[in-house]
Amino acid sequence: MLVVGGGAAALAAAIDAAAAGAAVRLLDAAPPALLGGNTRHSRNFRYTHDAPTRWTPDAYTAEELRADLLRASGGAAAPALLSALAQRSGELPGWLGAQGVALQRPAQGPLPYSRKTAFFLGGGTAAVRALADRALALGVEVTPSCGAHALVRDGRRVTAAVTALGTLSAGAFVLACGGAHADPVWLARHWGQAAAGFVNRGTPHVRGELLHWLLAAGAASAGDPAGLYLVAVDGRSPAADGGIVTRIRGMPLGLVVDRDGRRRHDEGADTASTRYSRWGQRLAAYPAQTAWLVLDAAGLRAAPAALYPPIQAASIDALAAAAGIDAAGLAATLPGYNASARPGTDPDAAAGWHTAGLDPPKSAHARPLVEPPFAAYPMRPGVTFAHHGIAVDARTRVAWADGGHLDNTFAAGMIMAANLIPRGYVSGLAVSISLVFGRIAGKEAVQAAGRIGADHGSH
Amino acid sequence: MGSVDPDKPGVAAETRRQLAICNICNYCNGLCAVFGAAERRHRLTDSDLDQLANLCHHCRSCLYDCQYAPAHAFAVNLPRALARQRWQSYARYAWPRALVGALDGSGLGPGLLAAAVVLAFTLAVVLAVPAATLFGVHTGPGAFYRVVPFGVMSAGAMLSLGFALLAIGIGVRRFWQATAPAQRAVGQGGRGTAAAVGRAVLDLLTLKNQSGGGPGCADRDHRPSRLRRRFHHALFYGFLLCLAATTVAAGRHHLLGQPAPYPLLSAPVLLGTAGGIGMVIGCLGLLWLRRREDPAPTDPASRGADVALTWLLLAVAATGLALLALRGTAAMGLLLAVHLGTVLALFVLLPYTKMVHGAYRAAALLRDALQ
Ligand SMILES: Cc1cc2nc3c(=O)[nH]c(=O)nc-3n(C[C@H](O)[C@H](O)[C@H](O)COP(=O)(O)OP(=O)(O)OC[C@H]3O[C@@H](n4cnc5c(N)ncnc54)[C@H](O)[C@@H]3O)c2cc1C
């Protein structure tokens, strides 16, 4: 059987299939150093457990996971897939351990409290390496730097994949090649000019060739092609693969202005980690998809560390000039904001400061920006994944728009995650979906390949 | 001899650049103590970098776990950056300043110097001791001292080791002062300090930070392995056993009036034999790993010094074991001279080889445990 992709979903499928005795070949479009796709950039995954485990405190029941996902997706998560995820995510720590993937115990260094997720020791890159080692040890033939761009189909059965190494036939196929968001042409189709202002946080190799081939051939789609999970990142980030460190996090401590120097949203409204994606989404609508986080020296001292140094200047005028913000606009915004800033009941508590009579308001941390030097971080939306892919059933069979499924072709990971999250997100979900449905797809593919072998034998 | 510029520009800046990325990412903070400490020392001053570099046990896992490792434009290779920083830190704190140049990363200078010391000592013995004595068979109490008089042996050891300990002590004291935190941690008194010392000693003796957070280190390639840690244990505990053998022997000599050599089933011989075998296994294992390891996470500039020191330790252990095996034969005299020569070379070079890493690592672990 043939597995297309090299991230969590592909490796999970390949491992379970090879362990069940199948002859498996895995193709990854990326060069060996980048094996692991976006999973390389991940840190933790969500799983259910009824009692504390070595890696996660307290409990997180299947019912809670179901409720979280329904809430996040606005009730749109496909019920059968949701049940499969709720049932099987609890197996993941044990399964990962058996494959040689190490998880981090909370006592092993500072982790944010999380009863819903477990953290890969050393992060996703370590996990992917261990999974790839395991796959190799099980005899999986891993071929890096080899993309598949089309399939050969005979009715409801796929017979071969067209790849950089020629046409490869197989008895069953697992498509675990992620979404399409690294393809600028596809992004532009749904986002127009704005797409040019986006940064891709992850691998440049998820370009959706097979996703689009399948949709063109008649497969049913899931989710919304214009739905992107965006996070606010530094505008100077590399075009791809900047990963986790490019985020801008200090919005509550300053003002976020567009290129005209105007504020558009309440920077104090959200101080939880949900602010990263909230701002990412907002930035998509900013002119040139760019905003600046403006801080004074006090705000800069309190702000979380950032990858690139801020643009700094002794005065607001000079800052505007250095950053490329309209100086008159910024000069008009700042005094108005400073004049409206009011302390809370305890003036020393920064969180209590808020604005009075300002539109939009700043409802927390609204201290006047007065201490030079002033600083600015340019921000852009960073694409993490797309809420769009192939529709599948709970067995991960690729669904056809006019009903029915492909017999021997299964999709797992971000290519089908939109069945569960056509919108919304909760942390650690993507890797869980990839692993759980990768394993299901691996098993299904072995059975399908067996059926096809038996068919051929009887002819 | 190659020279070390302790303030070589670029090294600290590069270490700082990489650690600043680590402090945002933090994915590796379960691997060892470096990452948590880097967060606490987020200002990353020059002495913070030295502290973090000496806290690093060079387990290398963080290179292979890094999403920003080279080919990535951010080019994060922390094991190499910290190895370079660490080697420079030895020079920065070394005493006396005039001998800083002896910290030669290529290992060539110390290697030649060690060979010269061994040769010179052996030659001196050959010239000074009559052939009949040197090549005679000596047994019974005081046999060794008929070849090399006790006074010469102990004075040589005391002087060379005494100077080495003084030099290392001053270096570590400088390091300790430089890495003191800006504000003293509050609420630390007798009990807290004792607990911290206990933790540091335990971490040092178990090499807890050389475990990749549990699964093992990237000894040869990215795959977790416990080989390096085990070989290091064999070498370290072998060395301690040899020191114990010498101490017991000195006690028997001075307190009980029983000069060496001792019977095969005596404490000094048993301790020394076990220690010597441990050192030989450890050295051979580490040298074997060195030949097989992926060079990417190591510092090419100080790799030679590392290898040279391992060979010197191997020479000390191997000649000691040979001396034990052949002490009843005519080869004893020459073997004794060669063995004492290697020990002398080790002592003389102690403060200017990688041997100092143990002292700085202990200080760094204690500093970390106190915070
Ligand atoms: C910075 C960042 C941090 C993240 N952190 C987390 C986290 O902490 N927790 C979490 O759950 N999720 C996280 N995610 C999301 C998560 O990493 C991914 O969504 C998930 O790992 C996807 O797994 P996958 O196997 O479906 O796809 P990927 O890991 O993206 O793998 C897709 C693979 O397919 C290959 N491929 C693509 N097209 C082809 C083709 N045509 N032919 C052959 N091969 C092809 C690619 O090279 C790649 O190897 C993060 C994402 C990013 C960008």
Image: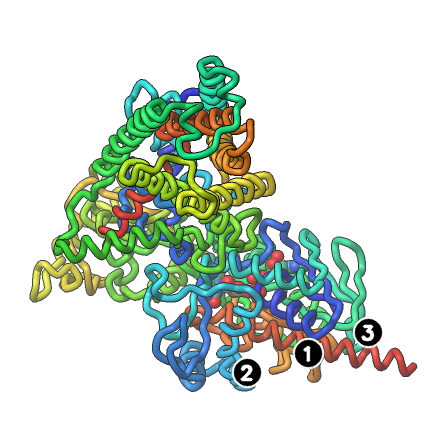
* Mark closest to the chain's N terminus, 2 or 1: 2
- Asked if disc 2 is less than 8 Å from ligand 1, the answer is no
- Disc 2 residue type (three-letter): Ala
Q: Identify which residue is drawn at 22% across, 48% down.
A: A301
Q: Output the chain of dot 1.
A: A
Which residue carries the number 2 mark?
A84
For label 2, the SS is helix
User: How far is the residue under mark 3 from the one under mark 1?
Assistant: 19 Å
Nearest the eye: B59 or B82: B59
For the question of whether residue A38 can be seen, the reply is yes
- Disc 3 residue type (three-letter): Asp
- Image x and y of residue A417, in percent: 55, 72
For label 3, the SS is strand
Nearest the eye: A148 or A108: A108
Which residue carries the number 1 mark?
A444
Query: In which quadrant will I find the C terminus of chain A?
Result: bottom right
Which of the numbered marks, if any, corresponds to residue B73?
Answer: none
Q: Is residue B111 above or below residue B241?
A: above
User: How far is the residue under mark 2 from the one under mark 1?
Assistant: 14 Å
User: How far is the residue under mark 3 from the one under mark 2?
Assistant: 30 Å
- Disc 1 residue type (three-letter): Glu
Which residue carries the number 3 mark?
A154
For label 1, the SS is helix
Location of residue A275 by image quarter: bottom left
Q: Are marks 3 and 1 on the same chain?
A: yes
- Image x and y of residue A404, in percent: 70, 84
Query: In which quadrant will I find the N terminus of chain A?
Result: bottom right
Q: Output the chain of dot 3.
A: A
